[in-house]
Amino acid sequence: MMDKSLTGNVALITGASRGIGRAIALRLAQARATVILVARTASDLHDVATEIRTAGGEVVVMPGDVTQDEQVTTLVQTVVEQFGRIDILVNNAGGGTPRTPVVKSRLSDWEWTLRVNLWATMHLTRLAVPGMITRHTGAIINISSLAGLTGKGGEAAYAAAKFGVRGFSQSLFEEVREYGIKVCTVCPGYVDTNLIPANRRIDRNKMIRPEDVAEAVYSVVVASPRSCPTELVLQPQYDPLKTS
């Protein structure tokens, strides 16, 4: 089956400098979308942009920290001024602090975790969705995690944030579905990125690849709004923790 072209679509992708975000940017650019790359590290973003341009794609680099409200507001204003629209929003920026029991956690770590995973997703979506409503089209894909399905000890704030992403997405869908806007949460299991450090207990060959997540995102973007999935749970075929 041939790819469906995304020519004319503007896609804003956060956390686009590496891992899942990079793979999503490359995949949407391959489908001829104009991709806006957002992350804190400009040099890494430019590396991704070079890959996209080399392949003939259209890309714009906009470094920024999505935990900073003023930067998020300026980001969306700049994209709309330059391109007139945001057709696809991929809220991928995320991360967590080292695993820590609740009683030993620092409030500053909780705040950062909630801001980067949940608050930024909510803020960016709030700014992008009015234009989608006006045009009666758009796609919002929020990257959650299996931690958003089942909590684990030492990951309370991260799990709370990822559960929150799912709840926000479900509520948003009920508000915008009548406008033909697609809203989907993607919950990957173990993904082979540098966020998971080397560990002899984990067989990285059995992990999900960032490109697998990117393909799932692409499938949502091109799906009909009449039957678009609202949540995708991605599990590796083989358990990476079973190394024998």
Image: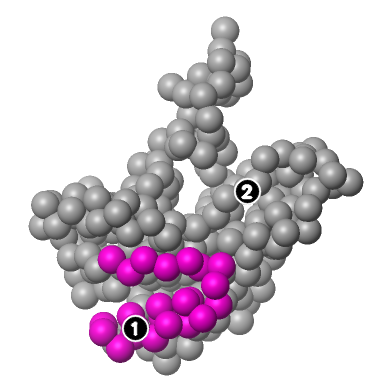
What kind of element bears circle 2? loop
Identify residue type, mark 2. Gly
Q: Position of residue 14 (x, y in %)?
A: 43, 62
Q: Position of residue 35 (x, y in %)?
A: 28, 65
Q: Quadrant of residue 120?
A: bottom right
Residue 191 forms part of the magenta stretch: no
Q: Position of residue 156 (x, y in %)?
A: 77, 48
Q: Main secondary structure of the magenta part?
A: helix
Q: Residue at x 29, y 73 (%)?
A: 10
Identify the mark at residue 96; answer none if there is no mark: 2
On the image, numbered disc 1 is attached to which residue? 78
Camera-side residue of 20 and 188? 20
Pick the quarter of the image with the C terminus. top right
Q: Residue at x 52, y 61 (%)?
A: 142
What kind of element bears circle 1? helix
Residue 77 forms part of the magenta stretch: yes
Camera-side residue of 103 and 153? 103
What stretch of residues is rendered in magenta?
Answer: 61-83
Mark 1 surroundings within 10 Å by alpha-carbon count, few (fewer than 14), some (14 through 19), many (20 or more): few
